[in-house]
Image (tube, rainbow, N blue to C red):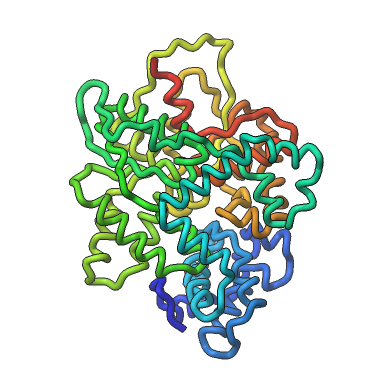
């Protein structure tokens, strides 16, 4: 069994001693029950597939794809089994061994590889929302008659902007005051079209902290959705394209405001290429230069909030949700909190199990909606216990999921990226 996503199945699968520790940490096993719903169960099936004892099947694929890739099992495993990466590689193999739905091919090999097509698709979505059709379907309950996955997408999907982040940010933003760094800012698909305020705030904050910021043109999707759905060859092509552009100039850092994008650059690209190749060396360089924006601000610039005056009675309570790809993927969890605590007028409140997955996992909330909602409900319950005005997080799909969960719970709390709050302090 071979996969484009490069891991040694034989060696990695040997590490699992079937102790079951992963079961007590998996947010899905609590809901699914039964061995196939646990990381240990999935690995046992993948091992049998690798050994040729079972063949690729839709039933097996359903089990392998019912995983959040939240990395909790991998982090907690006493034997060091990289369960999430084994799952990604197994999906890669199954993708090549079985025929795939046309809609999946169209999305992964079409829209998400061609920015112009993605822009057109998002423009149509914005038009659908602007005409009031979505609101009408929701209020009339007709939305419940739509196919399950379309219904789930329509419920969770926030408004798409008619003015993406790329049209709001200059190609180059000069630093306010002394120049300390020249950085490239990678604008991901979701923040560009759905949360453009995040890159706008990120560029503003970096500029106020001594950075010349280049909003790099010509880049494409980072490739995380492709790897999550086994389309690893396409992810490799996207990686080559993005690395050529991002490493063309000698930037001090590559900055991402999306946990999934930075995780892809720092963790995944290195698995797509053979050691010793030009592409592998490029992946190593990108890995070393990529920073989550919170980590860069805290570790490199020394965070400096603005001079905006805050009255004592204007304090706002903020809690923070750790995206899986940020905390467990990149060990970034202290920095967003330090950033938030540095902001005048912020009362920071830590929620219980802040690093527990919210159940979004990209499109998992659409493909496995009911299961995703069970995971989300636990997260929202913990968030509401601290009664926050803002829930901060560093991932657009987490933002989408948490916003939906808070609306369902009747909460007025708003979900934001930490840099959005920081940017408000600058006059």
Task: Say which of 420 and 13 sits in front.
Answer: 420
* Residue at (62% x, 81% y) in the render: 57
Residue that sits furthest to the bottom in the current view: 53
- State left or right for residue 423 relative to residue 246: right
* Residue at (46% x, 34% y) in the render: 163
- State left or right for residue 340 relative to residue 178: right
Residue 343 in view: yes
* Residue at (40% x, 70% y) in the render: 233
Q: Position of residue 105 (x, y in %)?
A: 52, 66
Residue 380 vs 49, above or below: the answer is above
Total numbered labels:
0
Residue 158 vs 232, above or below: the answer is above
Q: Quadrant of the C terminus?
A: top left
* Residue at (69% x, 55% y) in the render: 369
Q: Position of residue 239 (x, y in %)?
A: 34, 60
- State left or right for residue 293 relative to residue 35: left
Residue 80 in view: no
Q: Quadrant of residue 244?
A: bottom left
Q: Position of residue 275 (x, y in %)?
A: 27, 71
Q: Position of residue 300 (x, y in %)?
A: 29, 36
Task: Say which of 267 and 114 sits in front.
Answer: 114
Task: Say which of 288 and 148 sits in front.
Answer: 148
Residue that sits furthest to the left in the current view: 250
């Amino acid at each position: 069994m071979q996969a484009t996503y490069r891991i040694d199945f034989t060696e990695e699968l040997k590490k699992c001693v079937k102790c079951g520790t992963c079961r007590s940490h998996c947010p899905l096993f609590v809901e699914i029950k039964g061995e196939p719903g646990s990381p240990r169960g999935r690995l046992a099936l993948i091992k049998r597939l690798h050994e040729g004892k079972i063949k690729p099947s839709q039933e097996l694929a359903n089990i392998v794809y019912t995983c959040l890739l939240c990395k909790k099992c991998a982090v907690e495993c006493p034997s060091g089994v990289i369960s999430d990466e084994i799952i990604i590689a197994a999906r890669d193999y199954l993708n090549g061994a079985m025929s795939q739905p046309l809609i999946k091919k169209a999305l992964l090999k079409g829209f998400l590889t061609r920015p112009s097509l993605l822009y057109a698709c998002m423009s149509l979505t914005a038009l659908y929302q602007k005409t009031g059709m979505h609101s009408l379907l929701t209020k009339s309950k007709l939305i419940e008659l739509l196919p399950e996955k379309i219904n789930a997408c329509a419920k969770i999907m926030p408004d798409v902007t008619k003015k993406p982040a790329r049209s709001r940010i200059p190609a180059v933003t000069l630093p306010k005051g002394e120049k300390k760094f020249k950085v490239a800012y990678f604008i991901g698909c979701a923040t560009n079209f759905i949360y453009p305020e995040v890159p706008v705030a990120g560029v503003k904050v970096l500029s106020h902290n001594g950075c010349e910021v280049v909003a790099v043109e010509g880049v494409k999707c980072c490739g995380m959705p492709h790897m999550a759905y086994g389309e690893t060859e396409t992810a490799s092509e996207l990686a080559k394209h993005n690395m050529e552009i991002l490493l063309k100039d000698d930037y001090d850092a590559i900055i991402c405001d999306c946990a999934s994008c930075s995780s892809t650059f720092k963790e995944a690209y290195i698995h797509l290429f053979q050691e010793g190749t030009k592409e592998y060396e490029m992946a190593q360089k990108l890995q070393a230069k990529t920073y989550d924006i919170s980590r860069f601000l805290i570790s490199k610039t020394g965070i400096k909030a603005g001079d905006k005056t805050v009255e004592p009675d204007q304090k706002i309570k903020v809690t923070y949700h750790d995206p899986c790809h940020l905390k467990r993927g990149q060990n970034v969890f202290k920095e967003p909190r330090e950033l938030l605590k540095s902001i005048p007028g912020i009362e920071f409140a830590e929620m219980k199990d802040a690093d527990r997955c919210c159940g979004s996992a990209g499109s998992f909330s659409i493909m496995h909606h009911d299961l995703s909602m069970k995971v989300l409900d636990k997260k929202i319950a913990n968030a509401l216990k601290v009664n926050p005005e803002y829930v901060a997080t560093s991932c657009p799909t987490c933002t989408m999921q948490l916003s939906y969960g808070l609306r369902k719970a009747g909460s007025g709390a708003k979900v934001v990226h930490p840099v959005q709050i920081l940017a408000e302090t600058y006059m």
